[in-house]
C-alpha cells in the first residue's frame, strides 16, 4: 500500500508544473519558493539546481502546496509580479528566457504563445487596504458597496456593478450625483476611490482616440456595449503610435474604454465549451460568438460572448446578445429578474471587520 501511495504521489508530481514570477522592476523571471516572515514573496534564480524549491502548481495554475492564507494574500495583492505555471519538463533557465523574451517583445504572436501559462490574479486589491475615510467623505459605507457584488468587482480592478449615490464638496458647494466606483493605487501605495460620473454618450462622427465612430459603431455600442471590431487607436499621444484595439462603452455612465489587442487575455475555453478555430478567430477580431456551456448548477446556458475593453476580458452578453432568438432572450430575462428579486429580498450582511475610520 505504501509503495502504491508513493507511486501515486510521484505520478501526481510528474503532472505538476512549477511557479515562476516575472519581476516588473528588475524585468527578470525567477522561481517562486513561498513568502518570508513579512509576507513578501521569496524567489530564487531560475536554475535547475533550485527547481525542487519552487512552488508546485497544476496545469490550471492552482497551488498544490499548502502555503496558507498569507501567501494567497500576497498573490492576490497587487504587486510588481506576473505569475506563470511552467511544465515540469521545461528547464527553469529556458522558462525564464521564454517569459522574458515574450514580455520584452512587441510581437503579438509572442504574447499569445505564453498566454496559456499566465496565472491571472482574481483580486488586484485587498479590502483592508481601502481608504474608508475617503469613502466616508463621499457618503459611501462598506455595507453599501458589498451589496450587489459592487465591492467584489472593485477588488478585481473593475468598476462597481451599479451606480452609487455620491455626495461631495466642490467649488460650487455640496454636490450630489450617481456614479460608478473603482479603485486605484496612488503613488504613495495607498488604495483610493476613482469616481466615474454619468457623461454624454459619443455620437456618430465623433472621435475616440483618433478613431471616428460610424453609425454602425454607435448601434453596436448601444446594443452589446462593444464595437465588434478592432480599429487602430492612438495608444501613445507623444508619438501618435496606433495599435489595433477593442472598444467598449459602459451602458450606465457612457464611459468609453480601449484595450490593445496584443495585451488582451484571449481564451479558447468558456467553462466546458471550447471555441472552434473559426469561433476563436471571430472572438479575437472582436465579434460576438454564440456558445453553450454548463453552469455551476448543472444547467445548459446559451449566450453570446465577446471581448470587452471595459471588463478587460471575455464578457457574457446574455440578454444583450445579438445571436439569441427572441424566445431565448425572454427566458433569460425572466431568469435574471428572478435572481435579482431574490438578491433584493436578502438582508444586507453587516460586518464589523472593516469600518470607516
Image (cartoon, helix red, strand yellow):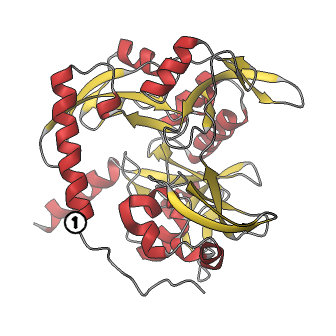
The residue shown at (49%, 83%) is 354
Helix, strand or loop at mark 1: helix
The residue shown at (51%, 25%) is 221
Q: In the rendered picture of this protein, how many numbered marks are placed on residues?
A: 1
The quarter of the displayed image where residue 81 is located: bottom right
Q: Which residue is mark 1?
A: 345
Quadrant where the C terminus sits is bottom right
The residue shown at (69%, 62%) is 185
239 relative to 311, above or below: above
Question: Residue 115's x, y, as percent?
Answer: 51, 35
Determine if residue 63 is in view.
no
Quadrant where the N terminus sits is bottom left
**In front: 19, or 207?**
207
Determine if residue 133 is in view.
yes
Question: Residue 166's x, y, as percent?
Answer: 58, 64
Q: On the rendered structure, is 145 left or right of 170?
A: left
149 relative to 106, above or below: below
Q: On the rendered structure, is 318 left or right of 240?
A: left
The residue shown at (25%, 21%) is 324
**In front: 66, or 24?**
24
**In front: 325, or 344?**
344
Question: Residue 254's x, y, as percent?
Answer: 57, 37
Question: Residue 195's x, y, as percent?
Answer: 64, 57
- Bin the neighbour count of mark 1 within 10 Å (Cα to Cα): few under 14, some 14-19, many 20 and up: few
Amino acid at each position: 500500500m505504501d509503495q502504491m501511495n508513493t507511486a501515486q504521489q510521484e505520478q501526481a508530481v510528474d503532472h505538476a508544473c512549477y511557479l515562476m514570477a516575472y519581476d516588473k522592476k528588475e524585468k527578470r523571471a525567477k522561481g517562486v519558493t513561498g513568502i518570508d516572515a513579512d509576507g513578501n514573496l521569496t524567489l530564487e534564480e531560475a536554475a535547475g539546481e533550485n527547481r525542487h524549491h519552487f512552488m508546485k502548481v497544476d496545469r490550471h495554475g492552482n497551488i498544490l502546496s499548502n502555503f496558507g492564507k498569507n501567501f494567497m494574500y500576497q498573490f492576490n495583492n497587487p504587486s510588481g509580479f506576473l505569475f506563470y505555471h511552467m511544465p515540469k519538463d521545461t528547464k527553469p533557465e529556458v522558462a525564464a528566457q521564454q517569459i522574458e523574451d515574450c514580455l520584452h517583445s512587441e510581437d503579438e504572436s509572442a504574447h499569445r504563445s505564453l498566454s496559456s501559462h499566465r496565472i491571472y490574479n482574481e483580486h488586484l486589491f485587498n479590502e483592508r487596504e481601502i481608504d474608508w475615510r475617503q469613502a466616508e467623505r463621499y457618503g459611501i459605507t462598506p455595507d453599501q458597496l458589498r451589496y450587489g457584488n459592487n465591492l467584489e468587482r472593485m477588488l478585481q480592478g473593475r468598476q462597481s456593478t451599479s451606480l452609487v449615490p455620491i455626495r461631495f464638496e466642490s467649488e460650487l458647494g455640496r454636490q450630489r450625483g450617481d456614479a460608478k466606483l473603482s479603485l486605484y493605487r496612488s503613488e504613495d501605495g495607498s488604495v483610493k476611490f476613482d469616481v466615474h460620473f454619468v457623461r454624454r454618450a459619443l455620437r456618430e462622427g465623433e472621435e475616440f482616440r483618433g478613431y471616428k465612430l460610424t453609425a454602425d459603431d454607435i448601434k453596436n455600442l448601444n446594443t452589446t456595449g462593444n464595437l465588434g471590431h478592432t480599429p487602430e487607436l492612438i495608444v501613445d499621444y507623444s508619438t501618435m503610435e496606433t495599435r489595433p484595439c477593442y472598444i467598449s462603452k459602459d451602458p450606465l455612465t457612457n464611459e468609453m474604454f480601449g484595450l490593445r489587442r496584443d495585451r488582451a487575455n484571449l481564451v479558447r475555453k468558456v467553462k466546458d465549451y471550447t471555441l472552434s478555430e473559426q469561433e476563436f478567430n471571430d472572438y479575437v477580431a472582436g465579434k460576438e460568438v454564440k456558445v453553450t456551456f454548463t453552469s455551476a448548477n448543472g444547467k445548459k446556458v446559451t449566450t453570446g460572448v465577446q471581448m470587452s475593453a471595459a471588463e478587460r476580458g471575455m464578457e457574457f452578453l446574455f440578454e444583450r446578445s445579438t445571436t439569441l432568438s427572441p424566445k431565448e432572450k425572454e427566458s433569460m430575462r425572466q431568469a435574471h429578474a428572478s435572481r435579482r428579486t431574490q438578491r433584493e429580498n436578502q438582508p444586507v450582511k453587516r460586518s464589523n471587520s472593516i469600518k470607516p475610520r
